[in-house]
Image (cartoon, helix red, strand yellow):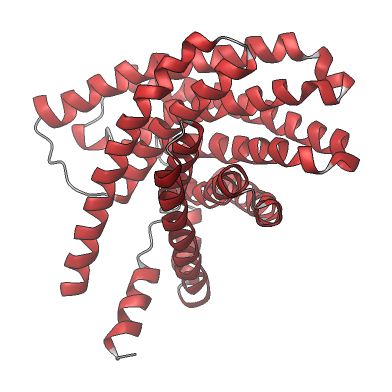
Amino acid sequence: MTDTQPNLLARAAADLFPGYFALVMATGIISIACFLLQMRTLSFVLLAINVVAYFALCLLLLLRLLLFFSRVKTDINDHVRGPGFFTVVAGTCVLGSALLIVMDRFGSALVLWFAGILFWIVIMYTFFTAVTVRENKPSIEAGLNGGWLLSVVATQSISVLGTLLVTRLVAYREPILFFTLCMFLLGCMLYLPLITLIFYRFTFVNVSVATRTPPYWINMGAVAITTPAGARLIIAAPGWSLLNEMVPFLKGFTLFFWAAATWWIPLLLALGFWRHVYKRFPLKYDPQYWGMVFPFGMYTVCTFQLANAIDFPRLMVIPRYFVYLALAGWIAASVGLIASLIRNAAR
């Protein structure tokens, strides 16, 4: 190893964007989407890439914690950058779900689920405590964006993976389903007040073109991941009498969130057109764009799961075509990432 390589690694760790695990979220969910839609080879390739990406990002995050802890502390106390840490939770659990669905790796998925729960506890309570007790808080227009909804995504990702795992953990079926049901409901609770504030900011606060950033796609991604969380509980309901009694409620609530996710798509596309075409805001690579790719993949999977859960196969026409939009976004973000890495290495 040359002297330059450690310097590059240290610099990458020091400058690591807190929300970079959205790359793992996006790649993992698109791998699942491809598998469900019988695009098996592509699914395996994406999963292999995702495993490498996950461990590379874990290494950088560990180095950042050990060598640049002051920067981590600053980020977790920041209203804008802090929510990005929730991608660590979501990325871990989405990767676990992909390993279980695509490769049937139960042991690895179980380890990632427990790791995701631990990350969730640490990040959830550290971030919300930090921003609550912080003095000199920013205004809503300066401190709030769609990234806050990553707390919902992280919560629902734990619910989804736990409900998938329960089929192999029969002896613990009821406590696990109770836990995943509570996580599903907690994610719903977090979404409703946060989206109210975000929608208020959207419509009543004057903000610049530069602030209409990709994290606003999490407005849709958060309800998209809530849909498979509810759908998996509906599918698992026959295994527990209490859950079975709640099926009508779960079906209505799950459909409610899928409809909300569907409503967001045209609006967010229109805002993207307004930002980059009408206002001619430069379109260049930003790690936040992975937070835009993830909702496309998640909407594909959530619609597939909803169609199965409520026995409405006509919905299947959506994921069959939407997956190509998700793949196009993934390819575009990947090209941007590679170009960015080459530029940074050259410098």
Q: Is residue 50 above or below residue 4?
A: above
**Relative image position of residue 346 (x, y in whole percent):** 16, 73
Q: Quadrant of residue 168?
A: top right
- Quadrant in which the N terminus appears: bottom left
Q: Is residue 289 left or right of residue 134?
A: left
Q: Nearer the viewer, residue 226 or 233?
A: 233
**Relative image position of residue 167 (x, y in whole percent):** 77, 37
Q: Quadrant of residue 42?
A: top left
Q: Is residue 1 above or below residue 59?
A: below
Q: Is residue 113 left or right of residue 34?
A: right
Q: Residue at x 53, y 12 (%)?
A: 313
**Relative image position of residue 115 (x, y in whole percent):** 67, 56
Q: Quadrant of residue 326?
A: top left
Q: Nearer the viewer, residue 194 or 333?
A: 333
Q: Is residue 90 left or right of residue 242?
A: left
- Quadrant in which the C terminus appears: bottom left
Q: Residue at x 39, y 23 (%)?
A: 320
Q: Nearer the viewer, residue 252 or 87?
A: 252
Residue 19 visible in this rendered orientation of the protein: no
Q: Is residue 280 above or below residue 258?
A: below
